[in-house]
Amino acid sequence: MALPDHFLDELIARTDLVDLVSQSVRLTKKGNSYWGCCPFHSEKTPSFHVVPDRQIYKCFGCGKGGGAINFVMELENLSFREAVEVLAKRAGMAMPQWGSSPGARERREKLLTINREAARIFHRWLYQPEGAAGLDYLRRRGLSKATLTRFGLGFAPDRWDGLITQLGQMGYDKRDLLDAGLAVNNRDGRIYDRFRNRVMFPIIDVRGEVIGFGGRVMDDSTPKYLNSPDTPVYNKSRSIFALNLAKRSKADRVILTEGYMDTIALHQAGFDSAVASLGTALTPDHAQLLSRYFRQAILAYDGDKAGVSAAQRAIPLLEKAGLKVRVLRVTGAKDPDEYIKAYGPDAFARLLDQSENQVDYRLAQLQSQYNLEDDGQRVTFLQEAAKLLATLPSPVEREIYGGHAAQTAGITPEAMAMEVKKAVSQRLRREEKQLTRKVLTPASQLQPQSRALRYENIRSARAEEGVIRLLMLDPAIHRSLDGLEPEEFSSPLLSRAYDLLRQRAQEGLSTQLAALAEEFDAEEMAHLAQVADQPETLANSGRALADYIAVIRREALRRSGGSESQLLLAAQRKNLEKKAYTEDKP
Ligand SMILES: [Zn+2]
């Protein structure tokens, strides 16, 4: 009997693998992962690591690997079911009945459809006489028509039954509207619209589905913001506003703001990697989600006391998820929106860049720890400063900031430069050592360790691994798989993994490795962890995916003894069939 999918998903989302492993292994952060001595074999130097943004562990010594659930299974020698129970208890979740939940998926689909319809209705209202106040408000906030369209903004009129009447005419009943969080029950069992006289912001997930709404008043009445309650499709501690747009940004830094208006204003001004958490402080789930798409995070919270403390809470969460964090100091305006209106986008871009170069700030922090009048302390300060500067990638930066440090300590820039050079070569030696261990895996290790899982066709298997990795990193790419079928894979193991991951992605379920723990044995999980552990980025993922698929198909044809021209023919035929099919559909 299977567990309800949403339960397993929530369990996985609530379980942070670094936290979990830390209970039994001492982990040290190095680069984007955490290293420690393997709990499954005896060793003195760490060859076991946990990758937070992929939520996997892997030992280069004994080869074990996987996700949270099979970690517990292996460590405590438990069955899948027992391990799930251990983790559920740890996450404070009540165990559901072990049974399938028929209809849950259909229910989810229906709620998503209602939300989509509601978003359309709200958007239409914005341009009708009833929505004039909303449109006027958004225009006064400086939003262009293109922005209103891009974010699908809308308006809920000042009526008790505006939305429920419209949706009712489309055949949705009371239960549907309550479940979607769009309506509220009153005491005598009648329902009324949750959102009234508010401008409406649809919340869209990374797959492009409308999962909920935020509504804002246009005056000073309260509550200023009203959000959808948690529903089967919306969970505020896991949803990030505008990530559906920001994930396509070319910028490698995400800009975190405190609210939708800031985020939208930033997008309109050209900063398309801005996002906001909604109706809640940033959670570990938010941080993990962001780390899938970005390497750096800039906190652009309000400059008031609440903003500062929210930033302080967010920093460790983001760092733990492997993101480099910078804090933006908005001076001369209340928030980024006001700042851009007052000083323009260029000034804001400069502000962003300044937030990146906090080297002087960190040097000042360091300086405050030492008494520079004392020769001994001055030497230690310079050595520490050199270490700090050695982490800067650019020689120009190292020289400029080295000059600042030299001036502070009263030595010549040349002497400082020598010290920095020494620290840089130490750093490079250290990194090289790590790299040798991590990346230069002997070719034999690329094969699954178990003979039963050996690859028949290495070239195809490499590409198959790539497809699987991309699906794990971003389930949304299931839309771009070009009809790739598990049968086209050369490795039976990878074929099975692909089949399951594709299905989960289509159903909107988690595609993290941990979710597969029930389907694969320890050896298979260990190999899949190794697959997940290889480098892969989501930048240009469309192109990478197309390349992988091309290799898989070419190799499949080669195996069946076909020629290149046959391959072309086959591809054309497939295309025609697909076309005919889509044209047949109403
Ligand atoms: Zn090991």
Image: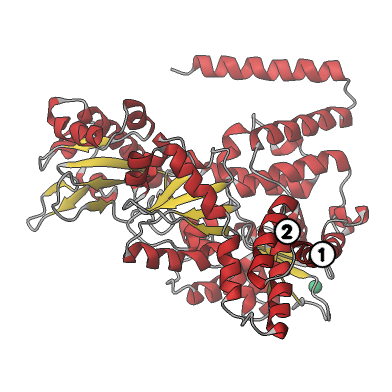
Earlier along the polypeptide chain: callout 1 or callout 2? 1
**Could you tell me residue 462's position as x and y percent?**
81, 43
Q: Which quadrant is home to the N terminus?
A: bottom right
Task: Name the residue rendered at 54%, 38% in the picture.
Answer: 249
Q: Residues within 10 Å of mark 2 (few under 14, many from 20)?
A: many
- Which of the 4 image quadrants contains residue 236? bottom left
Q: Is residue 340 above or below residue 143?
A: below
SS of the residue under disc 2: helix
Q: Is mark 1 within 8 Å of ligand 1?
A: no
Q: Can you identify the residue that label 1 sits on?
A: 418
Does residue 390 appear left or right of residue 147 in this picture? right
Mark drawn on residue 543: none
Q: Which quadrant is home to the C terminus?
A: top left
Task: Name the residue rendered at 38%, 54% in the picture.
Answer: 331
**Could you tell me residue 346's position as x and y percent?**
46, 38
Q: Can you identify the residue that label 2 sits on?
A: 529
Identified by mark 2, the residue type is: Ala
Q: Is residue 372 above or below residue 465?
A: below
Does residue 348 appear left or right of residue 554 in this picture? left
Task: Name the residue rendered at 15%, 35% in the picture.
Answer: 165
Q: CA distance from mark 1 to mark 2?
A: 43 Å
**Could you tell me residue 79's position as x and y percent?**
64, 72
Which is nearer the eye, 382 or 196?
382
Identified by mark 1, the residue type is: Met
Foreground disc of the pair 1, 2: 1
